[in-house]
Image (cartoon, helix red, strand yellow):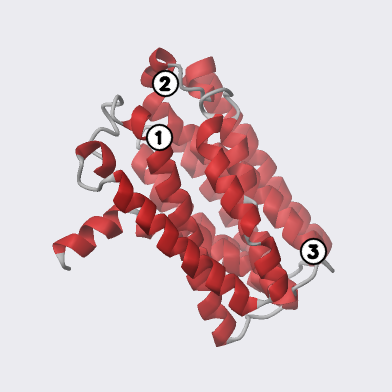
Amino acid sequence: MNPTLQKYVSFVKLEHNLFSLPILFAGATLADNKWPSLHLISLLILAGISARVVAMILNRIFDRDIDIKNPRTQGRHIPQGLIKVVEAWVMVVLCLAIYVFSAWSISDFCLQLSPIPIVAFAVYPFFKRFTKWTHLFLGLVWSMVPLAGFLAVKSSWDGIAPALILGIFSVFWLAGFDIIYAVLDEEFDRQSGVHSLPAAWGHKRALKMAAFFHLIAFLSLTLLYGIWFEGPVTVMLLFMLGVLLLLEHQFVQYIDFAFFYINVLISFMVLAFVNAGLRGV
């Protein structure tokens, strides 16, 4: 890969779309009990990736004063000077244009709602400056992913209840693993005044809250099964999701493994769970 292109790809953490795209399509399939058309799939991928990239870059821009002081994040592109702030803003504008075009191409309904995630992305980085519950706000931002998939297919709020339950799962799943990731910065956050549950409570108590959040996430999926789904394969996938959430807490000492690999697997497993449940298998 071209070194310049590689630099930008690594800057926006393109691989992190593996967390969000399966959840986006899980929401989309809930809207019509089937996969959307190839045309809509393409637009959803375009909108999902561009929106997540906007969120990532805004976070890097607004947190650059924190990142440059934190030994763990000093090697990021902006603190290292590998990418200038003005370059980052240009990328935000370009990705915003792609996102708005995608929303407009899907429907006027989606275009009207499109500013909501962007406002949430812009506000989120500031929560860590005044509340230890920043993890929950990030979860609330993340809950828009399955709702966006649903609304892109449906273009209305009718029948949105299952997607809302999946949104609740997303809130507590994301908040739980964000707490686990925040353990890496416990001491720095405490000394620098950055707010997080590990900094406020210590990692042991914070990890208990992360486990509680993941229990709520699992119960949300159980509720989704109990009301709308059926089938032995769906039950098996639900059980496997519970095991994966438990494993995430068994591997907290290997945070990169727990944060990335297990959660990517959970994301795809949720998509499989939703599709199996809708088909009653």
Q: Amino acid at mark 1?
A: Asp
**Quarter of the image containing the N terminus?**
bottom left
The residues tagged by marks 3 and 1 sit, at their Cα atoms, a distance apart of: 35 Å
**Residue 176's image quarter?**
top right
The residues tagged by marks 2 and 1 sit, at their Cα atoms, a distance apart of: 13 Å
Please tell me which residue lies in front, 112 or 258. 112
Question: Does dot 1 land on a helix, a strand or a loop?
Answer: loop
Question: Does dot 3 land on a helix, a strand or a loop?
Answer: loop
Residue 113 % position (x, y): 69, 62
> Which mark is on residue 138?
none
- Which of discs 3 and 1 lies nearer the camera? The answer is 1
Q: Amino acid at mark 2?
A: Asp
In the rendered image of this protein, does residue 14 appear above or below residue 73? below
To which residue does mark 1 refer?
A: 63
Taking the spot 79% from the left edge, 70% from the top edge, the residue there is 156
Q: Earlier in the sequence, mark 2 or mark 1?
A: 1
Query: Tag 2: Cα neighbours inside 10 Å, few (<14), some, or many (≥20)?
Result: many
The residues tagged by marks 3 and 2 sit, at their Cα atoms, a distance apart of: 38 Å
To which residue does mark 3 refer?
A: 160
To which residue does mark 2 refer?
A: 189
Taking the spot 63% from the left edge, 81% from the top edge, the residue there is 36
